[in-house]
Amino acid sequence: MELRFYDEPGEFLDVAGYYLGEQPVLSTVMASVASRVRDQRDAGVPWPEDVPCWFAAFVDAGAVIAAAMRTAPFGDYPAYLMPMSDDAAVLLARTLLGRDEPVLGANGALPAVQVFCEEMASATDKQARVGQHTRLFELRELKEPAEVPGHLRSATVDEQDIVAAWYDAFMVDADEQAGRPSGSSPHEAVAPDEMRRRIESGQVFVWEVDGAPVHVTAATLPAFGVSRVGPVYTPKEHRGHGYASRAVYEVSKRLLEDGTRACLFTDQANPTSNKIYEALGYERLVDMANLRVE
């Protein structure tokens, strides 16, 4: 088994595209991030100098059998791991340590992230702990929820400030609802230019009632025919009206009508959101986690 690193996402996609395309829902994060970074670089948008950016492919007998990346622009810049053998996870950790790049956290598939972080912890005299258990769902048969007042529409650039504030509040409230300390789940603070690009490209939707937005749901641009729904956020003062269920339904319906498969991640510590998505026809695919080495 050979471990190859790529600084250019386009080169990585050329090598690992077939592997990612064979399992497009499971690879949704890696495929969408690699595609986005490639497209932005092609458009002249620079990557932040202080944020690591690499993609890794595990190659055996000429075929890619696993992949990882480090692109997260938050916290200690955790890695992201696709499902892989214990040997592959250990190889990745030891290779990074060997090039003096301790990575103090990882998100992605279990048990790979657990094995990777435990190897990192052992080598750095630290401990690995789970920060958040997540679950990947795929939409199978869309089920319509009850109708609610208002309607879904694309967000506008004029609403960028409120959308950005709701993005920031999303993880804070998620920690609160799960009983975790506020801010214990590191997350991406979307830069203003990136938020504007997402709005202009039609990735961000709001639910509007009486002329005012009361909820936001987003969806990634498709990668290998799959789009990932999220974040899904309703401010506290507007909860309890079914806006989230209806918005996710409407966004999911649009994806299906465009011939795109839909998936999303949930926080396993939030049974309410899990129940909502299952009621819409999303089915559990795989359990994941984010871990820290501290």
Image (cartoon, helix red, strand yellow):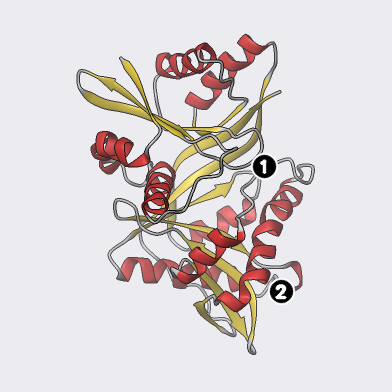
Identity of the residue drawn at 67% across and 70% down: 161
The label on residue 139 is: none
Element at label 2 = helix
How would you rate the neighbour count of disc 1 (Cα within 10 Å): few for under 14, some for 14-19, many for 20 or more? some
On screen, residue 133 above or below 261: above
Checking the image for residue 186, the label placed there is 1
Image position, residue 43 (x, y; %): 39, 56
Q: Residue furthest bottom?
A: 210
| Image quadrant occupied by the C terminus | top right
- Which amino acid does the dot numbered 2 rest on? His
Image quarter where the N terminus lies is top left
Residue denoted by label 2: 238
The amino acid type, in three-letter code, at marker 1 is Pro
Q: Is residue 208 above or below residue 9?
A: below
The residue positioned 30% from the left and 69% from the top of the image is 258
Q: Say what secondary structure mark 1 lies in.
A: loop
Image location of residue 114, percent across then percent down: 55, 23
Left or right, 56 with respect to 244, comes to: left
Left-right relation of 18 to 181? left
